Image: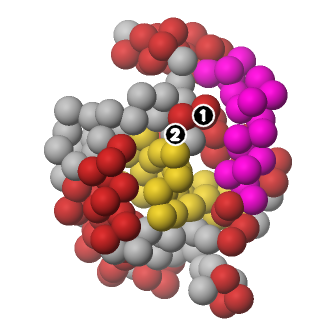
Amino acid sequence: MKTVYTIGYEGTDIERFVKTLVAVGVQAVADVRAVPLSRKKGFSKNSLREHLENVGIKYLAMQELGDPKEGREAAKAGDYDRFRAVYSAHVDQPESAMAIEKLAAASEEQAVCLLCFERDPKTCHRFIVGERMGAYGYEMMHLFGDDPVRYIRNQDKLAKRPSTLS
């Protein structure tokens, strides 16, 4: 199996977030937010791109995989069954399916991490995107951006990239 990473930036700051990605060896971040803006310093699209590029990580804008407003509202209300139904219907549309195929192709060449806000991947649509990538042979590894040292300490437990893709 191949690995696609996921991460949310809830509960962290941009410095620890970026250190986590670097510690794991992420080479590209796929921003799957419908609206790539944030009140949290450093996480709006352009600022995030700059922080990532400063450490050699590519920024991939994937707004077509963002959660529609109806799904975001359901998640915010804690109605996760409705959220999953709304987002699943969205992600099964041809445009979204093509975006997932594009994401899987990008992941063949580099270690990609799906980005959204929620810390808990099970309450975020990036989990559903990761599930859909299973059709391309991917499994998910969920990262938490608040303690990069845990990934440095546990380097031997991280997914290994084929040496031809360095």
Amino acid residing under circle 1: Leu
Tell me which numbered mark, 2 or 1, is placed earlier along the sequence. 2
Q: Is residue 132 above or below residue 102?
A: above
Question: Is 13 a magenta residue?
Answer: no
- Whole-percent x and y of residue 121? 47, 40
Which picture quadrant has residue 22? bottom left
Q: Which residues are magenta?
A: 87-105
Q: Residue at x 71, y 18 (%)?
A: 89
Asked if one can make out residue 161 in the rendered structure from this viewpoint, the answer is yes
Which residue position holds label 1?
Answer: 65
Amino acid residing under circle 2: Val
Relative to residue 132, is residue 28 drawn left or right? left
Label 1 secondary element? helix
- Whole-percent x and y of residue 124? 48, 33
Contact flag, marks 2 and 1 (Cβ < 8 Å): yes
Which residue position holds label 2?
Answer: 32
